[in-house]
Image: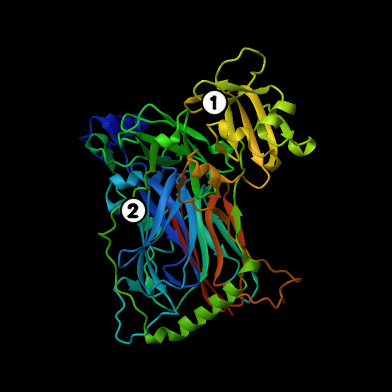
């Protein structure tokens, strides 16, 4: 009952969605919520070990057939025909869009796989709404060429595609052109995407673009954005039909759920619990434990750690056990796979592609991608705080002595229940409130101040003191003391003594800027080999207020037929799917 009430509250804004087009019998619209669906565009449906599988995801609201703003996280899995999960990626969504990649290792078997995409909220619906891409993987180091093998009916000639060269936008008014049809090695190519639409918005929307060598090996059909949207049916969920196992939508970022029990194995309740991310002061969250011992955290920013730290505010954490619940995983046992094995006539192509891949991997450091880490925010950013760089002072042995000697407006007092605690004088008033300050050590909340009194000050780089009141979620603090160490403090000692609880987590996929090779007269004759088969991958092209877009790329030393594939959707929800071919001689 409480879960349904929670879902009612967080989805109330969605209750006003007009569903007249989807179910004329729906009268109680406060009981319904949208259903999401995912479309996945990959750079290829045939991938070799030693290559990257790139993918771009589009999360849709099935009622509007536009990108969804509901979920802020998506999950992508690669499933083998035996049901094994090869990987699961956590993808942050921004306005329904996200992307990542997977380097295919040499320990995967040749075979048929499925790339599956979903959100937490989608797990309350049918598997048909999940993104589902058929991927064939060839491992040339374990391949067995079987003359009697039969390729599945889902495999088509590489010259065929599903709905390509169709643009479902106002009678083909979007055009993709290449400056010419034949290129030489290491030559510049220019893609022009334009529209005849006189509307000032042009073809505003979100797109992904791949330029890749065409393999002569047959590969699974690729679902176009047009075919996807044409088969997408409006759907909704009745909240009243959800039970206590319903999956919550991740509206405000990644959702963490856990349970606290006392030493007698009964559920704890009414406690405040914190979650800290090392060196990420802005991600500190504090939640209230409910009557079932459950707590929830929403984290809406990037983080780069594989562990988090829990503390129970003003309680001895050794008196409790904390369990962080694993992420929900859908039942994918009903997935159907096709037979796939290598054929003798593919031998030359397999050898050539393997050689290209080995050479490219050997020189990967010269063409590496760049990670986008965003603007790392600090808890006190934009606030008026005092900074003490300890290199500017005569160091004292302990933190307590350091505070006493030269950090102003902060003192140490003894509490009957908590022992020694730090106290920060408020800005503009001298009255002691009795409210403790927030204390962070390298981004981790230290609730038991006693543990820091004798901490070796030689390890500390700087101390920041904030004197105004501070509220983090449900918890009020009188000021803050943020301590940054020189090389990071030893958390093992704190863990061994039970000062806080550590839990392992999966890190979301980092956003990347994919490498774009460029040539001019200075490097065109470089002896550095260039056997790129993927000439360009742009997973997240946002077009705003333009009728023409030009994109440059450069060919490599690989000759043959290449394919340009553009997929995406306009802001009005219209699909765009265009394919164009060219040659490198």
> Cβ–Cβ below 8 Å for labels 2 and 1?
no
Q: CA distance from mark 2 to mark 1?
A: 54 Å
Task: Residue 181 in the image: state x and y as whole percent.
Answer: 57, 72
Task: Residue 562 in the image: state x and y as whole percent.
Answer: 52, 72
Looking at the image, residue 298 lies above or below residue 383: below
For the N terminus, the image quarter is top left
Q: How many marks overall?
A: 2
Q: Residues within 10 Å of mark 1 (few under 14, many from 20)?
A: few
Task: Residue 108 in the image: state x and y as whole percent.
Answer: 41, 71
Of 280 and 13, the residue lying toward us: 280
SS assignment at label 2: loop
| Tag shown at residue 130 | 2
| Tag shown at residue 326 | none
Of 165 and 48, the residue lying toward us: 48
Task: Residue 559 in the image: state x and y as whole percent.
Answer: 57, 79
Name the residue at 79% across, 35% down.
Answer: 394
SS assignment at label 1: strand
Label 1 belongs to which residue?
Answer: 419
Of 516 and 405, the residue lying toward us: 405
Of 20 and 309, the residue lying toward us: 309
Residue 519 visible in this rendered orientation of the protein: yes
Among the two numbered marks 2 and 1 on one chain, the one whose residue lies closer to the N terminus:
2
Name the residue at 49% across, 54% down.
Answer: 99
Looking at the image, residue 407 lies above or below residue 350: above
Front: mark 2 or 1: 1
Looking at the image, residue 581 lies above or below residue 173: below
């Amino acid at each position: 009952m409480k879960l349904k009430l929670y879902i009612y509250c967080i989805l109330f804004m969605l209750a006003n969605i007009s569903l007249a087009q989807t179910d004329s019998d729906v009268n109680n619209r406060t009981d319904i919520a949208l259903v999401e669906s995912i479309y996945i565009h990959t750079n290829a449906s045939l991938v070799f070990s030693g290559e990257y599988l790139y993918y771009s995801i589009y999360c849709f609201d099935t009622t509007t057939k536009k990108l969804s703003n509901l979920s802020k996280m998506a999950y992508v899995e690669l499933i083998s025909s035996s049901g094994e999960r090869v990987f699961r990626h956590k993808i942050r969504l921004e306005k329904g869009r996200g992307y990542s990649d997977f380097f295919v290792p040499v320990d995967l078997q040749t075979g048929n796989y499925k790339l599956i995409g979903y959100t937490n909220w989608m797990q309350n619906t049918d598997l048909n709404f999940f993104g589902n891409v058929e991927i064939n993987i060839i491992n040339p180091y374990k391949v067995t060429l079987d003359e009697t093998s039969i390729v599945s009916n889902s495999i088509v000639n590489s010259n065929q595609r599903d709905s390509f060269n169709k643009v479902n936008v106002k009678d083909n008014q979007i055009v993709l052109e290449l400056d010419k049809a034949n290129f030489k090695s290491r030559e510049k190519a220019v893609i022009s995407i334009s529209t005849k639409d006189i509307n000032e918005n042009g073809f505003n929307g979100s797109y992904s673009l791949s330029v890749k060598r065409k393999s002569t090996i047959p590969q699974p059909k690729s679902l176009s954005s047009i075919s996807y949207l044409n088969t997408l049916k409006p759907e909704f969920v009745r909240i009243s039909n959800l039970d206590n196992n319903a999956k919550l939508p991740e509206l405000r970022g990644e959702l963490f759920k856990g349970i606290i029990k006392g030493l007698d194995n009964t559920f704890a309740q009414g406690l405040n619990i914190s979650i800290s991310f090392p060196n990420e002061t802005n991600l500190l969250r504090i939640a209230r434990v409910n009557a079932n011992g459950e707590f929830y955290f929403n984290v809406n920013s990037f983080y780069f750690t594989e562990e988090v730290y829990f503390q129970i505010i003003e309680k001895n954490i050794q008196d409790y056990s904390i369990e962080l619940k694993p992420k929900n995983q859908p039942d994918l046992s009903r997935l159907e796979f096709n037979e796939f094995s290598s054929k003798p006539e593919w031998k030359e192509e397999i050898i050539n592609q393997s050689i290209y891949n080995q050479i490219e991997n050997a020189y990967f450091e010269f063409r590496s991608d760049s990670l986008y880490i965003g603007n790392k925010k600090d808890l006190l950013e934009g606030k008026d705080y005092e900074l003490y760089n300890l290199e500017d002072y005569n160091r004292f042995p302990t933190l307590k002595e350091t505070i006493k000697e030269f950090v102003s407006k902060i003192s140490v007092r003894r509490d009957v229940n908590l022992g020694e605690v730090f106290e920060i004088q408020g800005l503009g008033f001298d009255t002691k409130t009795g409210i403790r300050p927030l204390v962070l050590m390298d981004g981790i909340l230290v609730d038991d101040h006693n543990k820091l009194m004798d901490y070796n000050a030689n390890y500390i780089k700087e101390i920041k003191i904030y004197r105004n009141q501070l509220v983090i979620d449900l918890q009020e603090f009188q000021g803050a003391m943020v301590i940054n160490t020189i090389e990071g403090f030893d958390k093992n000692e704190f863990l061994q003594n039970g000062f806080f609880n550590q839990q392992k987590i999966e890190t979301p996929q980092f956003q990347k800027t994919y490498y774009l090779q460029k040539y001019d007269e200075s490097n065109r004759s470089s002896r550095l080999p260039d056997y790129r088969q993927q000439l360009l991958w742009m997973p997240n092209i946002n077009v705003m207020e333009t009728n023409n877009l030009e994109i440059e790329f450069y060919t490599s030393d690989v000759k043959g037929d290449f394919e340009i594939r553009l997929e995406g959707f306009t802001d009005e929800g219209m699909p765009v799917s265009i394919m164009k071919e060219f040659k490198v001689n």
